[in-house]
Amino acid sequence: MSSINRRNFLKGMGVSLALPSLESLDAKSSNRPAARRFVCVSPNYGMNPGGFFPEQTGEDYALPTLLKPLERHRRDLTVFSNLDHPEVGGGHGCSNTLLNGVELKDAKENPQRLLSLDQFIAEKIGQDTRYPSLRMGSGGISWSRAGIQLPSVGSPRQIFTQLFLEDNPKLKAKRKQFLSEDASILDAVLEDARSLSIRLSHTDQAKLEEYLTSIRDVEKKLQRRSEWIDVPKPKANPRVIEGDDENFVDLAYPYNTSVMYELMALALQANLTKVITFGHPGGNRLFPFDGITYGYHSLTHHGKRPDLLEELNIIETFYSQQFAGFLDLLKQTKDSEDRPLLDSTVVMFGSGMGNASSHSSRNLPIMVTGGGLRGGHHHRFERTGRDGRPLCDLYVSILQKLGVETDRFSTSSANLNHLVG
């Protein structure tokens, strides 16, 4: 089922939401930032550079093949060429560095360096929602402050249950008990750590403080989860995932992509979260599309063979089409102040993999839109030797647009406010 038909179905059937926590009920503030939400969509193997990057810069660039489905959004989109993570090497692992710019092997002495952009944003603006962040689809790009790679949920049915269905009273009581027991264990750990601290060297005390920071982070999460157990969830019509006699909903990947996007829009509209990541998986699956005869991973290693590039183009055009449908949905869906969700949501599409055919982490496919960011341009940065402009410079601008007061993030050297601010 096409994303257009799914959106018409969603609109026609009427999604019934119970009253969520509405921003407009909060105290009004003239200092409130224009952007209040962040969404990142990431294809694990990136996008073929030959079909993604425009040849011209500025406003009047010709849309390359993979951006043509986004024609109706070009005035809102900003596309970048030659954005890199300067400290990241090649290989499949670079996909996991998209939102932090740091490889696992380089953070052994300081795991907090692995904290990803989405989780940092969740710490700053997501603590007043039921879910500080939602991690959907394929995982790998979200990292906690403790340096742990965070899992994601790939099942639309499981996500719908998490967002909109109430647990039974017995299960709620069990969760409260487990959370209370976990909190007691943390109390004991913290007490032991404090008594140990006075016998340690300055170096070991610093390492212990990093550990305690992670423990405190877990403690806050347990407390927050406990506080939300008895707060009623908003309600949504289950036909979003079940369909009806006239509309079949395929929950198998990749056909469930439009469903995942609709769940994302519903979660944002109901203020269940302000931060979402959605990943398209890698692997060598055989996509069930006409014209596809090779596995996905095999196609990314095309070696510029025209037949393989043609098949890869089918898959990556699907990604672009679905992303365009998601932007349609964010423009159509209103927030609590009757504004399109896109106006208050920074949306980034990108990957930590630049050229999957050569496992390159350079020239990452990145585009952003929404949240008051200036759009309509293609910007190309100069390369200095092997490196382009740090992608984390863009992250600083995104953070500032979200009202986070910072001038640094990971490997940033400046910001891109002059281009997107």
Image (cartoon, rainbow, N blue to C red):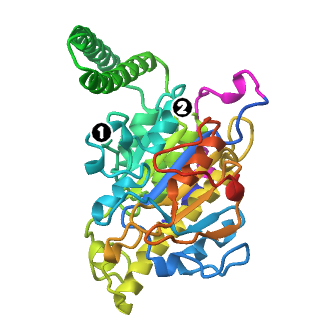
Decide which of 58, 386 is in the foreground and name it: 386
Residue 172 vs residue 60: left or right? left
Callout 1 amino acid? Ile
SS assignment at label 2 = helix
Residue at 31 percent of width and 25 percent of height: 206
How far apart are the two marked residues, 2 and 1, measured between alpha carbons?
A: 19 Å
Tag shown at residue 288: none
Q: Against 128, is 269 above or below?
A: below
Give the magenta range: 10-29
Query: In the orientation shown, which residue stands out farthest toward the bottom?
Result: 306
Q: Measured from the top left, where is residue 198 in percent x and y?
A: 25, 10
Q: Is residue 314 above or below residue 241?
A: below
Circle 2 residue: 124
Provide residue 88's location: percent of width, then percent of height.
Answer: 36, 59
Q: Total number of numbered labels? A: 2
Front position in the image: 251 or 152 = 152
Local crowd at mark 1 within 10 Å, few (<14), some, or many (≥20)? some
**Place of residue 293 in the rendered image (x, y in percent of width and height, measured from the top left):** 29, 83
Residue 260 visible in this rendered orientation of the protein? yes
State the residue position of label 1. Answer: 148
